[in-house]
């Protein structure tokens, strides 16, 4: 990736983090960088910072309470009034333990119903949960503790 693209990527993620307001969420910029790390810079630049922030935060909210061995799934059409961000497309979010072929399976389920995929984000995050499944921390690493 060129320096210019790297700077553009950093700029759009910083802009998204600033929207949350100072002191609102320590580590938000790091979270956004990890959340979108597998997304091409071109795809990030094609989206509004508000939408990048909203999608990541709503996915994090879905992950807040998930007992080990269960999946949390949400499908919705976000609006500014209800989710604080907007998309002209239905959003499907999944939070689960590491599961091989999950992205392929969800993609096949969506396309098998004659629906297209507009934007695919596959965040792979290492987290720490308490014994009840409450999210305690999103770690800045690729390796489980």
Image (spheres, grey):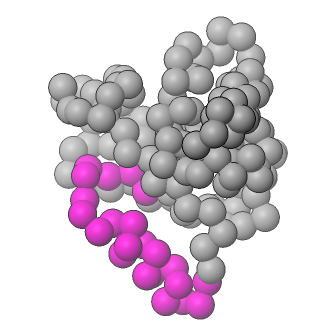
**Is 141 placed left or right of 20 in the picture?**
left
Residue 53 in sight: no
The span shown in magenta is 94-115
Q: Nearer the viewer, residue 9 or 83?
A: 9
Residue at x 20% of width, y 51% of height = 69
**Is 3 placed left or right of 136 in the picture?**
right
Q: Nearer the viewer, residue 112 or 143?
A: 143
Residue 3 in sight: yes
Residue at x 59% of width, y 17% of height = 25
Residue 60: percent from the left, percent from the top?
50, 38
Residue 40: percent from the left, percent from the top?
59, 51
Quick check: is 144 in the magenta stretch? no
Instruction: Name the residue at the top extreme.
Output: 23
Quick check: is 99 in the magenta stretch? yes
**Is 82 placed left or right of 145 in the picture?**
right
Q: Is residue 67 above or below residue 107?
A: above
Q: Is residue 101 above or below residue 8?
A: below
Residue at x 69% of width, y 52% of height = 42
């Amino acid at each position: 990736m060129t320096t210019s693209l790297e700077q553009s990527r950093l700029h759009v993620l910083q802009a998204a983090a600033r929207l949350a307001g100072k002191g609102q969420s320590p580590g938000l910029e790091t979270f956004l960088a990890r959340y979108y790390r597998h997304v091409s810079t071109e795809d990030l630049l094609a989206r509004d910072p508000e939408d990048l922030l909203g999608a990541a935060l709503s996915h994090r909210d879905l992950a807040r309470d998930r007992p080990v061995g269960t999946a949390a799934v949400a499908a919705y059409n976000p609006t500014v009034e209800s989710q604080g961000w907007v998309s002209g497309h239905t959003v499907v979010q999944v939070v689960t333990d590491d599961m091989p072929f999950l992205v392929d399976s969800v993609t096949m389920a969506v396309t098998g119903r004659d629906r297209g995929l507009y934007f695919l984000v596959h965040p792979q995050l290492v987290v720490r949960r308490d014994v009840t499944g409450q999210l305690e921390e999103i770690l800045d690493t690729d390796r489980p503790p």
